[in-house]
């Protein structure tokens, strides 16, 4: 079944991007599926996805922006999602008990840590024999990448941190209202295909830019079904979430990041507070903070249009 899914994915991606290479990197017993868009002689840019996000979630316009400007984007599925190793044999974490511990600030145990997930990204670079790479990460991927950079700074040329923070989530920074309810539902409730698609649409509409002329609900539903079929077991979302909640503040780590860093955060972000994004930027010595007025949480077309110049300049100004 995995071989068929990889084969099918290859042809889907080939229709959109000029794929140079795709395959698996290994971090001990964990296999990480990646796609390297090439070209191999261009500066590499490793992209790290957020909570429950597959490599297919990266907007094709962002990938094309990088390729068109002379870079080599490399994307991958975090462990427990997409075509990478699943930990479903561990089952879903105890939702109620872990939330009690979260709000009481008690230690939480996770199947794996954000540091383990950071090692997965490094395994992709090692597998591709890449000595140095740029790094772009969003949301949970930002949390993972903070550990990647702080322990492997010599492997990175520059860093772009989007919609993330160095603080470990607490009751004050946790999402509120409908967004909280939707995340909790995904964490513990099994839904039908239609219910999962509807939930994805509701979450997207909360996290995405409003009045996006490029958004097509029918196409979104088709892509959501395709992504669910690609990664049908959704229990990895719960375990990734617990890994976030079990982590500690990464203030000391980001204080030691010295590579050129661009921190991008939406002023309207309903998931990661804008103030926390700004605080994280303030802690990184060699950073530039780019606040985006109408940005919520996701990197969608209006956001790409807004940040593309700053993003490309950052990468080109801090090249080899």
Image (cartoon, rainbow, N blue to C red):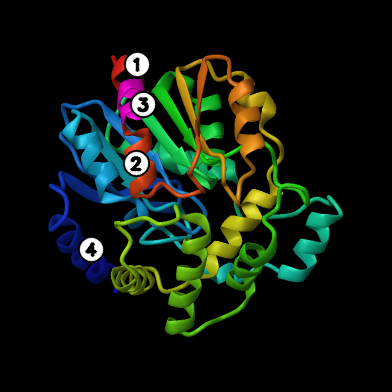
**Badge 3: how crowded within 10 Å, few (<14), some, or many (20+)?**
few
What whole-number distance in Å separates the C-alpha atoms at marks 3 and 4?
A: 32 Å
Magenta-tinted stretch: 309-315
Q: Which residue is mark 2?
A: 304
Q: Which residue is mark 1?
A: 318
Residue drawn at point x = 48 percent, y = 43 percent: 294
Of tags 4 and 1, the one toward the viewer is 1
What whole-number distance in Å separates the C-alpha atoms at marks 4 and 2?
A: 25 Å
**Badge 2: how crowded within 10 Å, few (<14), some, or many (20+)?**
some
Question: Could you say where residue 72 lies in the image, as x and y percent from the top left?
Answer: 23, 34
Residue drawn at point x = 83 percent, y = 50 percent: 105
Q: Is residue 311 magenta?
A: yes
Q: Are marks 2 and 3 in contact (CB under 8 Å)?
A: no
Q: Which residue is mark 3?
A: 310
Q: Which mark is residue 93?
A: none
Residue 87 in view of the camera: no
Of tags 3 and 4, the one toward the viewer is 3
Question: N-terminal of the two: label 3 or label 4?
Answer: 4
Of tags 1 and 3, the one toward the viewer is 3
Q: Report the side of 42 relative to 199 (left or right).
A: left
Q: Which residue is mark 4?
A: 9
Question: N-terminal of the two: label 1 or label 3?
Answer: 3
Of tags 4 and 2, the one toward the viewer is 2
């Amino acid at each position: 079944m995995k071989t068929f899914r990889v084969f099918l994915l290859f042809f889907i991606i080939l229709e959109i991007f000029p794929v140079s290479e795709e395959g698996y990197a290994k971090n001990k017993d964990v296999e990480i599926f990646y796609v390297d868009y090439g070209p191999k002689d261009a500066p590499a840019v490793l992209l790290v996805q957020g909570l429950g996000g597959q490599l297919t979630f990266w907007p094709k316009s962002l990938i094309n922006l990088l390729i068109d400007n002379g870079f080599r984007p490399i994307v991958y599925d975090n462990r427990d999602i997409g075509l990478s190793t699943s930990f479903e044999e561990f089952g879903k974490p105890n939702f109620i008990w872990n939330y009690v511990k979260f709000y009481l600030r008690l230690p939480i145990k996770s199947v794996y840590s954000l540091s383990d997930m950071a090692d997965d990204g490094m395994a992709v670079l090692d597998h591709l024999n890449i000595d140095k790479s740029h790094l772009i990460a969003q949301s949970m991927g930002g949390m993972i990448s903070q550990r990647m950079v702080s322990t492997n700074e010599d492997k990175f040329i520059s860093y772009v941190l989007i919609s993330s923070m160095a603080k470990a989530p607490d009751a004050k920074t946790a999402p509120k209202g409908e967004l909280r309810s939707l995340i909790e539902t995904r964490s513990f409730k099994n839904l039908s295909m239609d219910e999962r698609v509807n939930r994805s649409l509701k979450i997207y509409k909360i996290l995405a830019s409003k009045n996006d002329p490029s958004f097509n609900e029918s196409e979104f539903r088709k892509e959501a079904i395709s992504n669910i079929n690609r990664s049908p077991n959704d229990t990895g979302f719960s375990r990734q979430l617990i890994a976030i909640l079990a982590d500690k503040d990464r203030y000391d780590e980001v204080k030691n990041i010295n590579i050129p860093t661009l921190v991008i955060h939406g002023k309207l972000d309903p998931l990661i507070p804008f103030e926390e994004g700004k605080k994280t930027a303030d802690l990184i010595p060699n950073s530039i903070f780019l606040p985006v007025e109408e940005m919520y949480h996701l990197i969608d077309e209006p956001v790409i249009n807004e940040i593309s110049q700053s993003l490309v300049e950052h990468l080109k100004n801090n090249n080899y």
